[in-house]
Amino acid sequence: MNGDNRPKILIISDATWSDDNNIGNTFSNLFRDWPKDKIGMIYARSDLPNTDICDEFFQISESRLIKRFFNFNIKTGKNIKNISLKKIEKKNIEMDEVSGKNLYNFFLKYRWNIFLTAREILWKVGNWKTKELDGFIDDFSPEIVLSLGCPNEYMNNLQQYVITKSRAKSIIYFVDDVYSSKRFNLSPIFWFNRRLRRREIRKTVSMCDLVYTIIDKQKKEYDDLFGVNSKILNKGGNFLNKLIIKKNLSTPIKIVYTGNITSGRWRTLVKIGEALDKINKNKIKAILEIYTKNELYGKIEKAFEKIASVEFKGGLNVEQVKDIQNSADILLHVESIKLKEKLETRLSFSTKIVDYFERGKCILAIGWAESASIEYIKKNQAGFVIEDVSNIEVELGKLINNPELIRDYGNKGRNCGFNHHQINKIKESMLHDFKNLLTH
């Protein structure tokens, strides 16, 4: 380590570093105030970064991987300086961003196993191991490579390549369940792909000096699966500042949901809306405001058409999210009610829950008991939990009709944040881990 005592960190992720997406927001939370010349990222998405925490990026674009089959002069990877993109270069990258987003949204919308297999083939035959990538790794010269745990074979291949090329200490950070076999899928192609991916994930883990998991439930399972002693790294907040408490609840009570409605969460939101319509039959007691950047289409749009107690407000930037959450009486967290999606998110922890703790608002959490997020909130008495969707109307009615209960859970959530999510302590622990790696 030179100069500042913090090491040079190179992050490898399948998602762009944007303060508006979950993982980008988490990276910004953990690395705020890190020297900009000591933080860099290699990522495999066509989007441009949207953060002021990091300036050094290397982008590998799937749309350019495809285009190179027709034009060998196209560079599949580009060094992006966040602060100084030339106008012509920025325009070209933004064009790639549009085509790349369309490709990604297509995969996200349909997620057919054949398309996911085609994507893996693209990366196997595409030319991403380039002199530009090697040059970026050599020039940045990281002391630690931090890989986001990814379910894709191609991302693990990329991470393994960078770890080997850089000869740096390496860490893998799991924020979702990308490895376990607890899934529901009848497709043989899915299970064939899953087996290949699990093999590559295990290889990546074997190349790492430290494993981070995001929550204790995930730690317990992954420690057993990989034979490691992982450390928990979660998002933090500032719980030392005095909180300005909203004196009176809104009339009607304002329930706010901010975030994705994908992974089947929209179905749970529909159930809540239907319950609110019944509760509001004689008098409007509460409304649900949903702020999401997700597109409403087909069956999702149709499901909400007849619900009067739900209002869709569109997407928000980071600062707007804070303001809207502060204006709420109840902040909502939901999990899917479908088995397939419940298993997919079983070991995930929604980092916006930490934001909810920081706001000091009552958290209403709805989801099955096996969800790591639900389990965590219930264990710490940090929110009002409903595990059985058939009881939403009754349980939600109890909460809405009891203002003191709403205030009480706001205090309990804030206390949980103070006890477990103070950002300064999290950063100190993380830096200690990094230094320990480099001295052993």
Image (cartoon, rainbow, N blue to C red):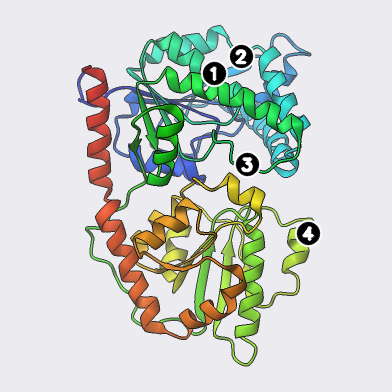
Q: Are marks 3 and 4 in contact (CB under 8 Å)?
A: no
- In the foreground, 4 or 148: 148
Residue holding disc 3: 183
Disc on res. 150: none
Mark 3 or mark 4: whose residue is earlier in sequence: 3
Label 4 neighbourhood size at 10 Å, few (<14), some (14-19), many (20+)?
few
Please provide percent x and percent y for residue 14.
55, 30
Q: Is residue 372 left or right of residue 127?
A: left
- Report how far apart the C-alphas of labels 4 and 2 lie in the structure: 38 Å
Residue holding disc 1: 158
Q: What residue type is disc 1 on?
A: Leu
- Report how far apart the C-alphas of labels 3 and 1 lie in the structure: 25 Å
What residue appears at the point 57 percent right and 26 percent down from the top-left corner?
Answer: 198
- Report how far apart the C-alphas of labels 3 and 4 lie in the structure: 24 Å
Q: Is residue 36 left or right of residue 299?
A: left
Mark 3 or mark 2: whose residue is earlier in sequence: 2
Front label number (4 vs 2) = 4
Disc on res. 128: 2
Q: What residue type is disc 4 on?
A: Lys
Disc on res. 299: 4
Please provide percent x and percent y for residue 214.
40, 42
Q: Are marks 4 and 1 in contact (CB under 8 Å)?
A: no
Visible residue check, residue 390 = yes
Q: Are marks 2 and 1 in contact (CB under 8 Å)?
A: yes
- In the foreground, 77 or 226: 226
Mark 4 or mark 1: whose residue is earlier in sequence: 1
Please provide percent x and percent y for residue 223.
40, 33
